[in-house]
């Protein structure tokens, strides 16, 4: 076999062995993962070579409005041509980092597969990122090539003077990429990568400080597809998935691309999947599985009139805790019990979750088969059920930050510490989310989890959205403060403050009630739908 020149940048910047997460491969299907593995073969080429190339694969809408309906064979051909452009025209070698920039679309999926096929490393970027943030990413991952939607070119172009490593940028959607690809044959010999070669670098949607870059191997992608999807989601090849998380976010990459393709199902990749647009898209594409955030389910529940959602059979929520009120509202409106799951960029995808049968309000669920989870104290010692502590997990995937001291915060003694405070319910063994460890409010000697107060407020009929934080207080150390967005037709006045405070006191332990309430038109959120509590804290 001819030896390929290989860029060892990522390999050279893995955490040292003693800071690596312990990996578990207990499930029989995980033990069968081979030592040499390019995940694009398993996800795409194998389907075609097994005679299923005609199955629908990625669906969407072109910028000019024409429907896109690519089969597995279509996506393979498209990805192969782009891979040839990368390798033959742009000189990409295995291990190079390639930046991907675009809203979710079949073309973005083809670009992702092209990068993986070439043995390079895909670095997705959220569409809303600005030049500053893009240059940080390019610098941290020493990115050499970029494939960018022409409509999102501006910020990347602005970033280029700060990006000396980034020498090759090709645009798609009325750009040079399609033209170059059209000249290429539709075949491609995938790079013969090792199972433990990095294929994805995912930047954390970090709320503060420099973003962290989590490295995932070809094997991690396949391992994730063998755990939560078959054991909890239980999708079938005829499913059509749809949803809002960007492919740059591992929640979206797994849910909307890797997992459906791993079983031969189809995925609808649409650019605009806001709560306003998603119900119509579900109806139009007859989607059967939907992935989005808790806030979006809440917003969509009021938005369903006139849309035929009869095709929908499963709904997945992640990114933030799912408030019991939102779960109930969605079930009352659609009859569907949401599958909640906690995952992270560092772990690639979901590691604690519950099937529809297990799901109950206020709990995330049970550890996903293939993973282990426990609640530990500050010294890493397991705590008994009922006690709040730090969530520790391990499984076939784990955290590997690229060249980052913060590896020691996330991985301790081989366990991944997600930064979440959890308890195990003594009654049914479910893991119950409390708050981000940093977000626990300590008021008058009590520990109060902001999300619990938020869940209580969301039960009030006037509340559309809310965020709860601790603010400094001379007497109590901190007091609980709620930022509330009211539904239309409700007055933001003193009477409402009192009504909400009384309501919380009647719903949860009275000491948790928000002593301060401020009304807002909107709340600050990340592009992945997470409430930015640090911004509420700054604004005070
Ligand atoms: C929080 C949740 C309660 C939690 C993600 C599914 O969100 C994802 O990745 P991020 O790196 O954030 C991780 C953190 O988000 N969180 C996520 N899901 C839940 N908290 N209940 C949940 N269901 O603080 C976690 O540590 O942005 C989610 C799949 C892939 C992902 N990357």
Image: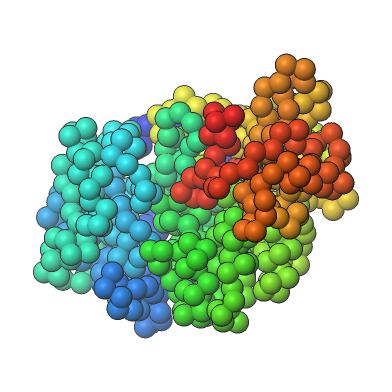
Q: Looking at this view, is 345 or 439 the one in front?
A: 439
Residue depicted at x 79% and y 38%: 513
Which quadrant of the figure contains the N terminus?
bottom left
- Nearer to me, 36 or 471: 471
Dividing the picture into quarters, in which one does residue 384 lie?
top right
* Residue 438 seen by the camera: yes
At 63% from the left edge and 67% from the top edge, which residue is drawn? 301
Q: Is residue 90 left or right of residue 199?
A: left
Height in image: 196 above or below 49? above
Who is closer to the viewer here, 86 or 256?
Answer: 256
Nearest to the observer: residue 305 or residue 52: 305
Picture residue at 27% right of the left edge, 53% below the top? 152
Q: Quadrant of residue 230?
A: bottom right
* Residue 351 spot, x, y in % from top left: 62, 50
Residue 416, how many percent across, how many down?
Answer: 60, 37
Taking the image as shown, residue 387 lies to the left or right of residue 520, namely right
Residue 229 x %, y %: 58, 63
Residue at the (57%, 35%) spot, across then down: 536
Residue 265 appears anywhere in the view: no
In the image, is residue 213 above or below residue 48? above
Q: How many marks?
A: 0
In the rendered view, tell whether residue 526 sits above or below residue 336. above
In the rendered image, the residue lying farthest to the top is 474
């Amino acid at each position: 076999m001819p030896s390929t020149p290989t860029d060892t940048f990522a390999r050279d910047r893995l955490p040292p062995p003693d800071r690596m997460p312990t990996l578990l491969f207990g499930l029989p299907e995980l033990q069968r993962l081979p030592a040499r593995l390019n995940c694009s073969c398993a996800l795409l080429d194998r389907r075609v070579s097994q005679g299923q190339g005609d199955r629908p694969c990625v669906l969407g809408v072109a910028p000019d409005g024409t429907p896109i309906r690519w089969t597995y064979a279509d996506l393979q051909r498209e990805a192969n041509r782009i891979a040839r452009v990368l390798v033959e025209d742009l000189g990409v070698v295995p291990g190079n980092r390639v930046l991907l920039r675009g809203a979710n679309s079949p073309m973005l999926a083809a670009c992702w597969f092209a990068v993986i096929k070439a043995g390079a490393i895909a670095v997705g970027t959220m569409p809303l990122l600005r030049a500053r943030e893009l240059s940080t990413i390019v610098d941290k991952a020493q990115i050499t090539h970029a494939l960018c939607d022409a409509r999102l070119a501006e910020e990347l172009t602005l970033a280029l003077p700060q990006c000396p490593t980034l020498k090759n940028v090709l645009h798609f959607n009325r750009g040079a990429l399609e033209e170059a690809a059209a000249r290429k044959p539709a075949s491609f010999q995938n790079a013969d990568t090792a199972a433990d070669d990095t294929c994805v670098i995912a930047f954390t949607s970090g709320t503060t400080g420099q973003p962290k870059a989590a490295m995932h191997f070809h094997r991690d992608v396949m391992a994730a597809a063998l755990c939560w999807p078959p054991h909890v989601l239980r999708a079938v090849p005829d499913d059509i998935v749809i949803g809002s998380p960007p492919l740059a976010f591992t929640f979206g990459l797994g849910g909307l691309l890797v997992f459906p393709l791993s079983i031969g199902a189809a995925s609808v990749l649409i650019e605009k999947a806001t709560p306003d647009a998603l119900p119509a898209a579900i109806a139009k594409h007859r989607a059967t599985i939907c992935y989005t955030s808790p806030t979006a389910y809440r917003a969509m529940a009021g938005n369903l009139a006139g849309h035929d959602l009869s095709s929908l059979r499963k709904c997945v929520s992640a990114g933030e805790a799912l408030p019991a009120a939102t779960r109930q509202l969605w079930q009352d409106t659609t009859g569907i019990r949401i599958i909640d799951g906690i995952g992270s960029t560092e772990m690639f995808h979901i590691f604690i979750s519950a099937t529809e049968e297990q799901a109950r309000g206020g709990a995330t669920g049970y550890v996903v088969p293939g993973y282990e989870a426990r609640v530990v104290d500050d010294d890493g010692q397991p705590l008994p059920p009922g006690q709040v502590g730090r969530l520790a997990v391990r499984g076939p995937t784990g955290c590997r930050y690229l060249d980052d001291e913060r590896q020691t915060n996330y991985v301790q003694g081989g366990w991944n510490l997600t930064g979440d405070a959890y308890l195990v319910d003594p009654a049914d063994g479910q893991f119950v989310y409390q708050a981000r460890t940093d977000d626990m409010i300590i008021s008058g000697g009590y520990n109060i989890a902001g999300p619990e107060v938020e869940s209580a407020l969301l039960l009030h009929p006037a509340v559309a959205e809310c965020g709860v934080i601790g603010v400094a207080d001379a007497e109590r150390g901190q007091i609980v403060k709620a930022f509330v967005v009211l539904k239309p037709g409700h007055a933001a006045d003193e009477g409402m403050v009192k009504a909400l405070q009384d309501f919380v006191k009647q719903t949860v332990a009275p000491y948790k009630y928000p002593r301060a309430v401020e009304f807002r038109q909107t709340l600050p959120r990340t592009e992945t739908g997470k409430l930015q509590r640090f911004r509420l804290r700054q604004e005070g």
